Image (tube, rainbow, N blue to C red):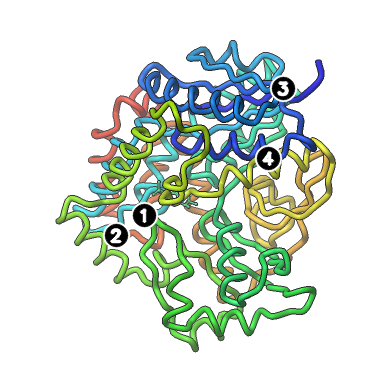
């Protein structure tokens, strides 16, 4: 059949209007014939609200795209070309627990890092692996494009344990960084090219070019400007301004998530204040979502409302649509995605997921080689990769000892004893979503 079939699992997400806008914008190059938005029973209402907005957006565009809403994932997957996953197992309530419980033990509470990230991986990975099983059966040629967090670990789980080979992870951090760098330099975004390398939420701008000229040093200098540099962050992360000498010596630009490692104390302090005030990110996001869904319900709304940009994940769907377009058209442009290392970064196992600049072809991403990361950067990257590998193995096997090992070697953890206590509490809090640990 003519045209592309897209299936979006977690279709009731507040981010979906961005995805729809992205497909409408690209219709000439990427003729999408149908979009199936899939959700679960608990997400039925959100799916209907977002789905109806999607239908109004398509109607306004006048394009022949059919929007289908369903709670039946398997029905949707039949003969799909691209499957995108944007699920949150346990919804925002579970995220709130990931953020609050570690903090009570003096550990950072964050959605994708440390103990919170580990438990999000434990809840998400089994569900995504089930999706790969369904895909093998119902649409074996389709690409799986995952944005579900923790995107790096979820991608790694698919690469090592999934039933299909065509898997790519995606994040909005590199796009954000590129936009911020262009702002810092006061130039159009199109003039800037950044070579990225590292892991998801731990990616570095290794080299920065302005119209082909290497301007890395200039950007590093500007990034520590107390005013301009502070503007370089994401909505969900407290901005920090690093010491000029530190960034200069590091020689590469860290991503906003690095502040959880390079400014541990400040970030922890800030989160403890949020905990006390009952204002951890999950609770703020719940408020933003209420506002967004109230807007989405308005029958006169037929565009993506600008308020969506209050969310940390803004522009991620744009990244997804560009990626799908490049695969579909064999465009061979460069985008930053999460993919199999395959020797790209020295010292990381071949089958692990890394995040780096890749040429996007009809056969998927081809990473630009990196080789050895700078020594000062390599240590943290390898340490987090060990944590990620252990976490993925624990998520798949349900081995509690492995979970303890993973958290104890994480640089945000203060001791194995604390790790054990945090794990016990989180295991209990999330037990309904962790069947693999409770067999
Ligand atoms: C970032 C990350 C995403 C994450 C989002 C959280 O931009 O790259 O992976 O999902 O922020 O934003 P939120 O608004 O949910 O806190």
Where does label 1 land, which residue? Answer: 408
**Does the residue tagged 2 have its C-beta within 8 Å of any atom of ligand 1?**
no
Residue 158: name its quadrant.
Answer: top right
Where does label 4 land, which residue? Answer: 25
Q: Earlier in the sequence, mark 4 or mark 3?
A: 4
Q: SS of the residue at dot 4?
A: helix
Q: Are marks 1 and 2 in contact (CB under 8 Å)?
A: yes
Q: Are marks 4 and 3 in contact (CB under 8 Å)?
A: no
- Residue placed at 79% from the left, 74% from the top? 212
- Rounded to the nearest angstrom, the CA distance separating label 4 from label 3 is 14 Å
Q: Is residue 262 left or right of residue 373?
A: left
Q: Earlier in the sequence, mark 3 or mark 1?
A: 3
Where does label 2 land, which residue? Answer: 415
Q: Are marks 3 and 1 in contact (CB under 8 Å)?
A: no
Seen from the viewer's position, the closer of residues 334 and 412 is 334
Where does label 3 land, which residue? Answer: 33
- Rounded to the nearest angstrom, the CA distance separating label 2 from label 3 is 53 Å
């Amino acid at each position: 059949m003519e045209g592309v079939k897209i299936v979006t699992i977690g279709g009731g997400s507040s981010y979906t209007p961005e995805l729809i806008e992205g497909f409408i914008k690209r219709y000439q190059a990427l003729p999408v014939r149908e979009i199936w938005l899939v959700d679960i029973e608990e997400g039925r209402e959100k799916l209907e609200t977002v789905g109806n907005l999607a239908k109004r957006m398509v109607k306004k565009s006048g394009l022949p795209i059919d929007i289908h809403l369903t709670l039946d994932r398997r029905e949707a997957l039949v003969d799909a070309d691209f499957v995108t996953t944007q699920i949150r197992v346990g919804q925002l309530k579970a995220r709130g627990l990931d953020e609050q419980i570690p903090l009570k033990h003096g550990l950072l509470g964050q959605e994708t890092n440390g103990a919170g990230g580990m438990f999000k991986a434990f809840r998400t990975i089994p569900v995504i692996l089930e999706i790969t099983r369904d895909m093998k059966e119902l649409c074996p040629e389709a690409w799986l494009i995952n944005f579900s967090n923790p995107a790096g670990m979820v991608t790694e789980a698919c690469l090592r344990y999934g039933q299909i080979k065509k898997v790519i992870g995606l994040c909005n951090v590199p796009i954000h960084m590129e936009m911020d760098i262009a702002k810092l330099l006061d130039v159009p975004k199109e003039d800037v090219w950044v070579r990225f390398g590292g892991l998801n939420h731990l990616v570095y701008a290794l080299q920065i070019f302005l119209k082909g000229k290497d301007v890395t040093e200039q950007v590093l200098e500007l990034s520590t400007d107390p005013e301009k540099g502070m503007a370089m962050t994401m909505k969900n992360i407290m901005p920090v301004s690093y010491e000029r000498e530190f960034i200069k010596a590091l020689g590469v630009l860290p991503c906003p998530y690095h502040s959880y490692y390079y400014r541990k104390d400040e970030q922890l302090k800030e989160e403890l204040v949020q905990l006390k005030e009952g204002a951890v990110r999950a609770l703020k996001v719940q408020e933003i979502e209420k506002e967004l869904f109230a807007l989405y319900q308005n029958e006169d709304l037929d565009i993506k409302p600008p308020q969506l940009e209050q969310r940390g994940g803004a522009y991620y769907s744009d990244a997804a649509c560009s990626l799908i377009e490049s695969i579909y058209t064999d465009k061979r442009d460069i985008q930053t995605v999460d993919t199999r290392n395959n020797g790209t970064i020295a010292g990381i196992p071949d089958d692990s997921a890394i995040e780096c600049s890749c040429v996007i072809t009809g056969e998927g991403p081809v990473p630009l080689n990196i080789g050895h990361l700078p020594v000062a950067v390599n240590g943290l990257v390898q340490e987090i990769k060990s944590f990620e590998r252990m976490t993925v193995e624990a998520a798949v096997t349900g081995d509690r000892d492995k979970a303890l090992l993973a958290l104890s070697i994480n640089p945000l953890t203060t001791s194995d004893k604390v790790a054990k206590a945090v794990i016990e509490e989180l295991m209990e809090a999330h037990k309904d979503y962790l069947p693999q640990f409770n067999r």
